[in-house]
């Protein structure tokens, strides 16, 4: 038998999942119009229940230019043959009782070999259908009603402890379990063989997936095949809860589709990108196609809880998050029929291509640099010169941003003088530079703890270990700035100008009426609309495409240390270009104090040492004493009256003020 021709979906896959009941209810003209609108909006595939596909639907998809993919329910009571005829497929809890059905399905246990054989035969039959251009395997996991059990605060059930599964575990692993109730066996498993149990569950899912994909490709070589994934926040959670090990499963299929339904899971739209990036860490070259929830319509949900309303802003945020995080711009809309007259034009704006360029355009930091396309063929010295030539562009880019940066400095000085704080917020390299800059201000300028604070996506561990998916957590950015007040200034650092973690922080800051500053390398940064000031250092494409730790990182470091240094100077923490609030935390810095005092006053080292000792080690107080002839108490009082600004205190005492002439500057 000759396999039918395949109209395989393009990459990136941009699909709509539409319920078979919706397609059945539409008239022919309504269905054709919907498919035509999908294609016009930039979609290239339709996914629906494989068994429901008709020749009429297949022809309509071909006419619209859409591939037609069939979803196959594997281990769910939606599956056929009728699962209710096989009681051994239903999961059993640790207390020995069958799982209660939740909102709209019950997962089945994936260890019955007779059922798996039937499932493989069914996949083979669907594969040879001339109506389908590919198959997507669904419910290929251990039982879990993740739509409810992965919500914040929920406690997911641990597994099924049915007799068949427990016997299969012993057969595969050679680990004998004690006799007795399922509860006793479950307790023994988790007390003594926890990792072996999780490894076994992964092996079962991987083995079944391999068997099904082998059946599909034996029946129809080359047929496109996808796999739906549970939207756990990280690979370890997915492995332990449902046995889906992405590193093992991804090589078996053409695409993995994480079901990142943010509203159903009561998460922010940025959750879509968070999940996709987590999957990409293990997926290799296999395409990652995030699922984007389009609606919480009670009609489509049929009484299930699909979460809060999805606004236009939410939908745009979720689509952007998916496109940014998928790696190649793929996504799948669920359900496709949730898109209305507003949603489809918005989708078209983000998916349509023109001259091969995506809309909206890539930020400069993500574009390819034509000057370095041959960098991998250069000798080492020329390679370094090419990088250096790009780095040389950074100072000019920073110089162009100085007028706006000056406004940010003045705002920060006013905030700190009024008792407010300055917050740095960033992810990845941007956030690490922020942490380093803030950390230097206490020893260098004696800045009190908590006055300038850095917030790094992923927390302290992200300083030494990459936590790139943390940048997609918009809600974490909001939480980081939960205590911000109207007296504060918030600097959000995002090279691309669109980082969700920074977006959340700036949104929280604006809600609190704080002054907001975006520091980016993108003149068209989306987040600029949410900031009072936009310090833009347009450094252009990187020498290595997308490696923003290079020029963009250098620019942000220059901006940060220029900003913080200018703030400290304006707060009077220097005399001329000499530090006056240096913390002598080691021998080198103690020696520097004496040197600075001598440079500022022209006094000899012995005199400087004696006055500094009399001033209790307070460099600024000793400086005022030496420059004015006042005693220590008078110097401290003058500094207190004049906001700890040495030059103002010296001018007020005016017994002797050498001004700016050498050496007393």
Image (spheres, rainbow, N blue to C red):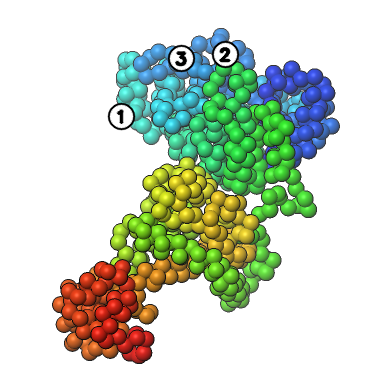
Q: Looking at the image, is mark 1 or mark 3 earlier in the sequence?
A: 3
Q: Where is mark 1, residue-wise? A: 191
Residue visible at 27% across and 69% down in the picture: 641
Disc 1 to disc 3: CB gap under 8 Å: no
Q: Could you tell me if residue 644 is visible in this image?
A: no
For the residues marked 3 and 2, what is the alpha-carbon distance in whole angstroms? 15 Å
| Alpha-carbon span between mark 1 and mark 3 | 26 Å
Question: Depth check: 253 or 56 in front?
Answer: 56
**Quadrant in the rendering for residue 619:** bottom left
> Compared with residue 636, is residue 33 higher up or lower down, i.e. above or below?
above
Q: Which residue is mark 2?
A: 83
Q: Secondary structure at mark 3?
A: loop
Above/below status of 516 relative to 92: below
Give the mark nearest the N terminus, 3 or 2.
2
| Residue 260 in sight from this viewpoint | yes
Q: Which residue is mark 3?
A: 100
Q: Nearer the viewer, mark 3 or mark 2?
A: 3
Give the crowd class for mark 3: few <14, some 14-19, many >=20 residues within 10 Å.
Answer: few
Which residue is pictured at 46% across the width and 30% down the height?
151
Q: Are marks 3 and 2 in contact (CB under 8 Å)?
A: no
Question: What SS does tag 2 mark?
Answer: helix
Q: Residues within 10 Å of mark 2 (few under 14, many from 20)?
A: some
SS under mark 1: helix
Which of the two discs, 1 and 3, sits closer to the camera? Answer: 3
| Residue at figure coordinates x 40%, y 59% from the top left | 415
């Amino acid at each position: 038998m000759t396999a039918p021709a395949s109209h395989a979906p393009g990459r990136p896959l941009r699909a709509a999942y539409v319920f078979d009941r919706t397609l059945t209810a539409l008239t022919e003209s309504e269905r054709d119009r919907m498919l035509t609108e999908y294609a016009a909006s930039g979609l290239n595939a339709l996914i629906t229940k494989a068994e429901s596909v008709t020749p009429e639907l297949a022809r309509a998809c071909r006419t619209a230019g859409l591939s037609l993919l069939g979803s196959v329910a594997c281990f769910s009571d939606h599956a056929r043959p009728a699962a209710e005829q096989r009681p051994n497929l239903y999961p059993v809890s640790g207390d020995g009782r069958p799982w209660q059905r939740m909102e709209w399905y019950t997962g089945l246990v994936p260890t019955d070999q007779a059922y798996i054989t039937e499932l493989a035969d069914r996949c083979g039959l669907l594969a040879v259908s001339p109506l389908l251009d590919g198959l997507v395997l669904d419910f290929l996991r251990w039982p879990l009603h993740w739509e409810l059990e992965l919500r914040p605060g929920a406690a997911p059930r641990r597994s099924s402890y049915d007799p068949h599964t427990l016997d299969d575990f012993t057969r595969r692993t050679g680990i004998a379990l004690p006799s007795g109730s399922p509860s006793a066996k479950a307790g023994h498993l988790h007390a003594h063989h926890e990792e072996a149990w999780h490894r076994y569950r992964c092996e079962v899912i991987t083995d079944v997936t391999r068997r099904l994909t082998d059946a599909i490709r034996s029946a129809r070589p080359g047929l496109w095949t996808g796999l739906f994934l549970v939207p756990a926040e990280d690979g370890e959670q997915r492995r332990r809860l449902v046995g889906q090990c992405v590193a093992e499963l991804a090589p078996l299929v053409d695409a993995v589709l994480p079901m990142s339904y943010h509203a159903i899971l009561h998460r922010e739209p940025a959750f879509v990108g968070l999940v996709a990036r987590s999957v990409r860490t293990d997926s290799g070259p296999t395409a990652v196609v995030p699922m984007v929830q389009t609606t919480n319509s009670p009609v489509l949900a049929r009484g299930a809880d699909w979460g809060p309303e999805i606004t236009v802003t939410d939908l745009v945020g979720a689509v952007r998050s998916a496109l940014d995080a998928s790696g190649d711009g793929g996504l799948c809309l669920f359900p496709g029929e949730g898109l209305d007259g507003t949603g489809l034009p918005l989708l078209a704006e983000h998916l349509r291509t023109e001259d091969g360029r995506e809309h909206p355009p890539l930020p400069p930091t993500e574009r390819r640099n034509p000057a370095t396309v041959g960098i991998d063929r250069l000798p080492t010295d020329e390679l370094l010169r090419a990088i250096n030539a790009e780095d040389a562009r950074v100072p000019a880019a920073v110089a162009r941003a100085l007028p706006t940066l000056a406004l940010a400095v003045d705002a920060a000085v006013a905030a700190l003088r009024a008792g407010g704080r300055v917050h740095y917020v960033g992810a990845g390299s941007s956030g690490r530079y922020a942490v380093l800059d803030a950390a230097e201000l206490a020893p260098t300028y004696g800045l009190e703890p908590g006055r300038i604070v850095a917030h790094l996506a992923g927390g302290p561990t992200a300083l030494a270990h990459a936590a790139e998916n943390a940048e997609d957590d918009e809600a974490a950015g909001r939480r980081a700035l939960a205590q911000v007040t109207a007296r504060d200034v918030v600097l959000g650092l995002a090279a691309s100008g669109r980082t969700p973690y920074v977006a959340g922080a700036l949104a929280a800051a604006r809600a609190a009426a704080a002054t907001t500053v975006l520091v980016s390398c993108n003149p068209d940064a989306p987040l600029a609309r949410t900031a009072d000031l936009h310090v833009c250092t347009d450094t252009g494409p990187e020498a290595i495409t997308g490696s923003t730790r290079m020029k963009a990182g250098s620019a942000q470091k220059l901006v940060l240390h220029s900003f913080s240094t200018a703030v400290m100077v304006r707060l009077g923490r220097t005399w001329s270009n000499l530090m006056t609030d240096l913390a002598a935390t080691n021998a080198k810095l103690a020696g520097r104090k004496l040197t600075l005092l001598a440079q500022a006053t022209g006094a000899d080292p012995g005199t400087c040492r004696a006055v500094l000792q009399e001033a209790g080690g307070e460099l600024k107080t000793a400086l005022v004493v030496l420059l004015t002839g006042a005693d220590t108490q008078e110097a401290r009082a003058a500094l207190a009256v004049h906001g700890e600004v040495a030059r103002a205190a010296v001018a007020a005492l005016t017994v002797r003020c050498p001004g700016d002439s050498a050496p007393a500057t």
